[in-house]
Amino acid sequence: MSCFCRTNSCLVLLKNPNFTAETIVITNSQIRDLLNEIALHNCEKAYKKLFMEMHESLTGFAYSILRSTEDAEEVVSDFFITIWQRRTSLQTIENPRLYFFTSIKNASLNKLTANGRNKLPNGIEWETRLNSVFFNPEELLLSAEVVQKIMQAVNELPARCKTIFKLVKEEGLRYSEVANLLEISVKTVEAQMAIALRRLKTHSEFKSQFPELHSLLTQKK
């Protein structure tokens, strides 16, 4: 039996180095379906699934701004309470993932203001290590050793660079969306992605040995 799920997003969470018990990262389309279920049918099952799918990423993002586990959990919990309270209007959200991250950013900044700070930290970074594979290793015939080297390179990226790479390649946001979210220019996003790709050596050994992976990694959004 294959250790990897074949998905359009080609994104699998790793639970251990043997690549077992993976979880597919939810897509924008799937989030929209859940929001529709919540909005139209008051579906608690869909609401719980949405919470379980998005909680870790949103809490990690909130923590990267607040630097407080308690505050991050509070911000995310309040956000999901608001989602349920305003469920009848959820169908109007065009880009759910971007909406979620933007809402968490704004709520986190409000929390910072309440705590006597009012600026987005320059060193914003997910404190949790990037633990996903943003391609399908099985389809590209990559060994576990090669995958581990790629992930190690990603996790060793500078703070801002890793955050931008994570938002683009793991969370599926476009360059312009990341720029708006982090309050930086699109050129900065492009520059940081270029740094990340150079660190991953996608323009040298990966380009010649794994052209499909090179194409996937260097695809601009």
Image: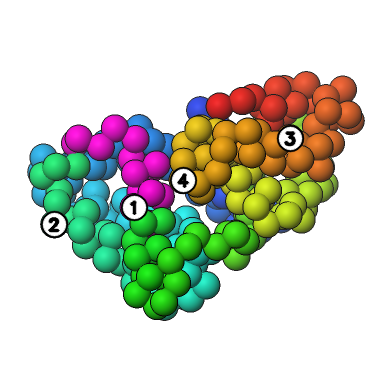
Residue type at the position of mark 1: Ser
Disc ID at residue 43? none
Q: Nearer the viewer, residue 119 or 41?
A: 119
Q: Earlier in the sequence, mark 3 or mark 4?
A: 4
Residue type at the position of mark 2: Gln
Q: Which residues are magenta?
A: 91-104
Q: Residue at x 51, y 28 (%)?
A: 8
In the displayed structure, would residue 112 be above or below residue 1?
below
Residue 125 drawn at (x, y percent):
60, 59
In the picture, the quarter occupied by the N terminus is: top right
Q: Earlier in the sequence, mark 1 or mark 2?
A: 2
* SS assignment for the magenta stretch, majority: helix
Residue, disc 3: 194
Q: Residues within 10 Å of mark 4 (few under 14, many from 20)?
A: some
Q: Nearer the viewer, residue 19 or 44?
A: 44
Q: Earlier in the sequence, mark 3 or mark 2?
A: 2
Q: Earlier in the sequence, mark 4 or mark 1?
A: 1
Q: Is residue 99 magenta?
A: yes
Q: Residue at x 10, y 44 (%)?
A: 88
Residue type at the position of mark 4: Leu
Q: Earlier in the sequence, mark 3 or mark 1?
A: 1
Q: Residues within 10 Å of mark 2 (few under 14, many from 20)?
A: few
Disc ID at residue 181? 4
Residue 197 drawn at (x, y percent):
75, 36
Residue, disc 1: 103
Disc ID at residue 85? 2
Residue 127 drawn at (x, y percent):
60, 65
In the picture, the quarter occupied by the C terminus is: top right
